Image (cartoon, rainbow, N blue to C red):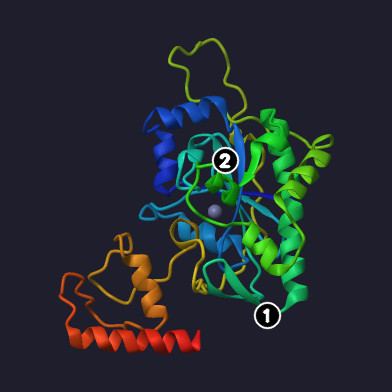
């Protein structure tokens, strides 16, 4: 397993851990993860580097995960220390679980939430298998590091939602089943269990500074003690925006909105992004979110919606 350390130090979630912002962050750092949650990005973007670059920004305050698995190489890009509290599942699972995103093949085209067409099945299956194998090894190593039982500690975002600890998403099962891979979470847990015996633990990151440090004791190895692997020559990722994203916010980098008066964090921004992609609203300088919608505009919007439904 190739591990590339590329921490999202500019992301507000990283900064919240650095301080740490409240007891939830401090507690996670003391105990480490008590569970591991598997995600997939929900858009046809195979390159981890695209997410790493998109999320390593001070204004990207919607999500932060511990790692991305690149679909083209199977490399694991570690984006948070394993004992930092992430923002990956939109629920109390963030207090207990570490989150890992599988990047998805470019040989797909999303047609709606959790639905996609497969453009090149052979490529898509190979891409998916690459991330699956790397995730099995990564999860086995994390279970070894933190003494976790794969059968009780490993879940998907979808299972987290069913258990009431995560937002209502279907990943990564929608990806696996949509491709017809035969992968399941029980199969994944079985594979992680099988890999556990030979899995090498990670060096444990340090807990937050002890309030009464012993000045005589030399500091132990830092979590960064392992020589970070840098990507060879990172190729420029194609900044293809993920169109329609089944994992709306906080999973995929959102495309830019063509208006100057809409903050991408506004409550309706994701819906507007969708409407622009569907050509229900055209681009312009101003969206004027507070302006009234006349009957004349309503009927035009209805026809554009109808056209969008006809063309998919
Ligand atoms: Zn997810």
Image coordinates of residue 261 in percent, x first then y, are 22, 70
281 relative to 212 in the view: left or right: left
Q: Quadrant of residue 46?
A: bottom right
Closest to the observer: 203 or 88?
Answer: 88
**Dot placed on the residue nearer the N-terminal end, 1 or 2:** 2
- Secondary structure under tag 2 reads strand
Are discs 1 and 2 less than 8 Å apart at CB?
no
Q: Can you say whether 164 is above or below 263 in the image?
A: above
At 66% from the left edge and 60% from the top edge, which residue is drawn?
70
Task: Please give the residue where the numbered disc 1 appears in the rendered image.
Answer: 119
Image coordinates of residue 169 in percent, x first then y, are 52, 56
Task: Please give the residue where the numbered disc 2 appears in the rendered image.
Answer: 98
Q: Quadrant of residue 117?
A: bottom right
At 66% from the left edge and 38% from the top edge, which residue is drawn?
226
Closest to the observer: 294 or 286?
Answer: 294
- Secondary structure under tag 1 reads loop
Instruction: Note whether residue 169 is visible.
Output: yes
How packed mark 2 is, by other alpha carbons closer than 10 Å (few <14, some 14-19, many 20 or more), is many
Q: Quadrant of residue 152?
A: top right
Closest to the observer: 233 or 193?
Answer: 193
Q: Can you say whether 133 is above or below 285 in the image?
A: above
């Amino acid at each position: 397993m190739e591990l590339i350390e590329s921490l999202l130090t500019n992301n507000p979630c990283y900064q919240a851990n650095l301080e740490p912002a409240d007891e939830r962050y401090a507690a996670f750092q003391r105990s480490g993860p008590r569970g591991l949650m598997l995600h997939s990005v929900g858009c046809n973007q195979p390159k981890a580097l695209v997410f790493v670059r998109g999320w390593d920004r001070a204004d990207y305050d919607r999500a932060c995960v511990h790692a991305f698995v690149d679909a083209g190489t199977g490399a694991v890009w570690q984006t948070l220390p394993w004992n930092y509290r992430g923002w990956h599942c939109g629920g109390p699972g963030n207090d207990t679980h570490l989150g890992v995103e599988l990047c998805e093949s470019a040989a797909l085209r999303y047609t709606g939430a959790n639905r996609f067409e497969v453009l090149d099945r052979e490529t898509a299956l190979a891409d998916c298998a690459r991330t699956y194998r790397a995730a099995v090894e990564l999860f086995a190593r994390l279970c070894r590091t933190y003494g976790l039982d794969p059968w009780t500690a490993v879940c998907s975002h979808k299972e987290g939602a069913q258990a009431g600890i995560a937002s209502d998403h279907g990943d990564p099962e929608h990806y696996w089943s949509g491709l017809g891979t035969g992968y399941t979470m029980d199969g994944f847990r079985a594979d992680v269990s099988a890999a556990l015996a030979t899995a090498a633990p990670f060096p444990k990151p340090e807990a937050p500074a002890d309030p009464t440090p012993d000045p005589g004791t030399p500091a132990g190895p830092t979590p960064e003690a392992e020589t970070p692997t840098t990507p060879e020559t990172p190729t420029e990722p194609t900044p293809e925006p993920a169109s329609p994203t089944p994992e709306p916010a906080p999973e995929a980098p959102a495309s830019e909105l063509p208006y100057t008066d809409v903050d991408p964090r506004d409550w309706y921004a994701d819906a507007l992004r969708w409407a622009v992609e569907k050509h229900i609203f055209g681009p312009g300088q101003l969206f004027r979110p507070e302006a009234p919608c006349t009957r004349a505009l309503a009927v035009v919007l209805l026809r554009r919606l109808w056209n969008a439904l006809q063309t998919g």
